[in-house]
Image (cartoon, rainbow, N blue to C red):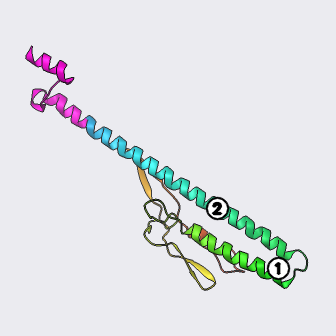
Amino acid sequence: LARLQEQVATGRKFARPGQDPVAATEALGLDAILARNASYLRNGSQAMSRLGLEEGALAGMGDVLQRVRELTVQAANGPLPAGDRTMIAAEVRELRAQLLSLANSQDGSGAYLFAGNATQSAPFLQSGGSVAYLGDQGQRLVQIGLDRFVADGDHGAGLAARPAGKADG
């Protein structure tokens, strides 16, 4: 009767593991499963956040490239005064710097989005007239289930700028 009153008062079937060793073992196993599932949920949320930041950076790059196209068309249409060409060139230089900044975007913890597995250093470095990719081509995977892994971003090797006049083969 005392044990039943204790169960009713505490809301627990047993207060000490020795009272029901089998149930205690099962409860510990369930606690471990719940903790693991919470970890998977956290990993999934962080991956979605990183992918959202990457998507925003890529959208920004698309906007910058669209403006560069507009300026290129403007510069190619008819004769322009030297002052206009100088202004277009200055804006293109600013847009290039903006692209470099977007390519070196970081997440909330300071990890670079497009660096592959080398997330602690800036993946893109401008040297003279060209930009070099210093990250690796690895892809970070996070575990979101017992046997499920997803990539939380992409490396930036495909984003590396090429010197003017050079195209893909």
**Which one is closest to the eye, mark 1 or mark 2?**
1
The furthest residue to the right: 78
Vertical arrangement, residue 13 with respect to residue 83, above or below:
above
Mark 1 Cα within 10 Å, few/some/many (few <14, many 20+)?
few
Q: Quadrant of the C terminus?
A: bottom right
Residue 24 magenta-highlighted: yes
Residue 74 magenta-highlighted: no
Total labels drawn = 2
The residues colored magenta run: 1-29
- Is the stretch drawn in magenta largely helix, strand or loop? helix
**Label 2 is placed on what type of residue?**
Gly
Q: Quadrant of the N terminus?
A: top left
- Res. 22 in view: yes
Tell me where residue 145 sits by quadrant. top left
Q: Residue at x 45, y 64 (%)?
A: 111
- Res. 158 in view: no
Percent x, y for residue 120? 42, 69
Q: Residue at x 43, y 61 (%)?
A: 109
The label on residue 26 is: none
Residue carrying label 1 = 84
Asked whether, in this view, residue 130 is left or right of residue 21, the answer is right
**Label 1 is placed on what type of residue?**
Asp
Residue carrying label 2 = 60
Disc 1 vs disc 2: Cβ atoms closer than 8 Å? no
Vertical arrangement, residue 31 with respect to residue 105, above or below:
above
Is residue 143 or residue 41 the one in the foreground? Answer: 41
Question: CA gap, disc 1 to disc 2?
Answer: 25 Å
